[in-house]
Structures are given as C-alpha cells and as structure tokens.
Image (cartoon, helix red, strand yellow):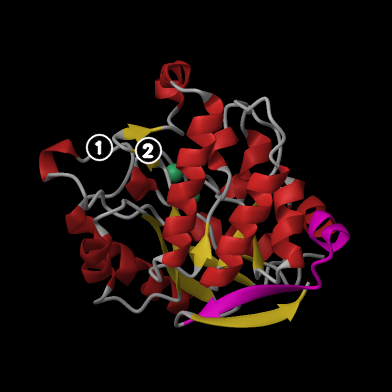
Amino acid sequence: MLKQLVDYHTHTTRCGHATGTMEAYVEAAIAAGLSEIGFSDHIPMYWLPEAKRDPGIAMRMSELEEYVADVIRLRERYREIPIRLGLEADFIPGREAELSRLLEPYPWDYVIGSVHFIGEWDFDNPAKTNRYAEWDISELYAKFFTLETMAAKSGLFDIMAHIDLIKKFGHKPSHDLGRVYADVAAQIAGAGVAIELSTAGRRKPVGEVYPNPLLLKECCDRGVPLIISSDAHSPQEVAWGFAEARALALATGYTQVCRFEGRKRIMQPL
Ligand SMILES: [Zn+2]
Ligand SMILES: [Zn+2]
C-alpha cells in the first residue's frame, strides 16, 4: 500500500529521547511496505561547547562515526530494503562553515535541515513552552520563517524538515498567514531544496501535519519537491499516518515525491 513511499526521518536511541533498536526501525519499515528507510539522527550539538551539549537532545560528537558505521552495517543484514544514511542537522546562523566541515567526511544519502533554536531557546522543547509568553506571536513567526528560509538557502541541506514547526504547541498569530506562506514558499522554491510533509505534527498539541495544508499548496504550486516523513522517535512511528499524508499530497496537487542517493534527488510517482 505504501509501496513507493520512503521514510527518511527517523531517530535512534543515541539522541537520548528516542526508543527502539535500529533493527526494529528497519523491520517496521519492511512491515509497513515502504520501499526504503533512512536514518536521520540528530547531529551532535556542534555549535555549543562540549560541556553544554545536552545528551537528551543529540548524540555526542564521539558517537557520530559509530552512528554512520552502524547504518552502513545494517545494509548487509537487510538486503530486502535499501537503508539510507542521513542526518537531521540543526541550522544555526553564523555556524554554516562548522556544519559543513562536520558533514564533509561522511557518505550521506541526504541531510535534513531543521530550525529548532531561536537564539538559545529550543522552542520545540515541551519543558520550555513558558517562553512563548515573552513573544508577540506574529513576530515570533516572522523570526522563525526568516531562519527557516535562511536554512533552505544555505545550500547545506537536501530536505527541510517541519517547515512551520513554530506552531507545534498551537500558538498562532491572529492575522492571516496567506502572504507569509506565499513568501516562504517562493523563497524555498528558489533555494531548490525539498520539503517534508511530516506527520509528526498530528502527534503534537497543534494536531496537524507540517506544513499547514495552505503552505503545502503554496509550495506545490511553485514546484517544491516533496517527501513524506514521520519523524519517528520509536519503531511504532515509522510510516505513521502515511496513507492520510499521501491522500493530502495528492489532493494538494502533488503527483511525485522524491528520494535520495548520495545526495542526489530522484523523483518518483506518488
Ligand atoms: Zn528528536
Ligand atoms: Zn527529527
């Protein structure tokens, strides 16, 4: 049923907030009938000094090499499904060169770009939602989308994750977002990166996919390539909600989705 679909946004226990063995993720992908699975664990917090890197957010720098080796090793064990090597990398403005150096030695199939931080605030952390009260929500959205489009245009990423993550806990500006969405979609289209249709938002307080269907439509109209992802933090979440996501993508006007090999984008029918 999910045959042409892949799930490229999955995590491992190395990040300190996901569960299940890597084998269990692969087996869940096979059971769901996916055509590929990719791992995209959180990049070590390269922009912070070692002592400030939270082991509950991402793997340690010393674990990166082993993570890559483990994904590659899994390919020998499971010949029935291609296993892609990816990474979810935080975009931190001003740290692009460090990120590029960190990515350089490894044979990634794709790199997913994420904005999880506004300044020092990891605004998607459920323990830090009190800080939303410090912001005018319209300004916060503007700040978030500025970072998101900078990230898209950085040339560091193949896929942009959850491009309206700022809505995660249900905070919405009072004004209509139509013009904001059109501008964001135009900038992402110009950057030439793919976006995720992520089912993770449906499991969060906001209760809807990332991106909002209106933003998805703006992206579709401008030819932004799409990939459907779960952002699984447990094997049970692999391919979660994919049938509904595919139906939404088709209803929006998408006829193709993409996959990646060695950071090369390949389009296939949806
Ligand atoms: Zn995570
Ligand atoms: Zn993720």
Q: Residue at x 68, y 38 (%)?
A: 202
Coordinates of residue 243 in the picture (x, y in percent): 80, 55
Coordinates of residue 257 in the picture (x, y in percent): 70, 72
Q: How many marks?
A: 2
User: Where the C terminus falls, by quadrant?
Assistant: bottom right
| As drawn, 202 above or below 128 | below
In the image, what residue type sits under mark 2?
Ile
The magenta stretch is 248-261
Q: Nearer the viewer, mark 1 or mark 2?
A: 2
Q: Which residue is mark 1?
A: 54
Residue 225 is tagged as none
Q: Quadrant of residue 153?
A: bottom left
User: Where the N terminus falls, by quadrant?
Assistant: bottom right
Q: Is residue 210 visible?
A: no
Q: Is residue 156 visible?
A: yes
Q: SS for tag 1?
A: loop
Q: Is residue 20 magenta?
A: no
Coordinates of residue 232 in the picture (x, y in percent): 55, 49
Q: Residues within 10 Å of mark 1 (few under 14, many from 20)?
A: some
Q: Residue at x 45, y 22 (%)?
A: 135
Left/right placement of residue 35 relative to residue 72 reads right
Q: CA distance from mark 1 to mark 2?
A: 17 Å
Residue 118 is tagged as 2
Residue furthest to the right in view is 251
Give whichever of 231, 224 is nearer the camera: 224
Q: Residue at x 53, y 36 (%)?
A: 141
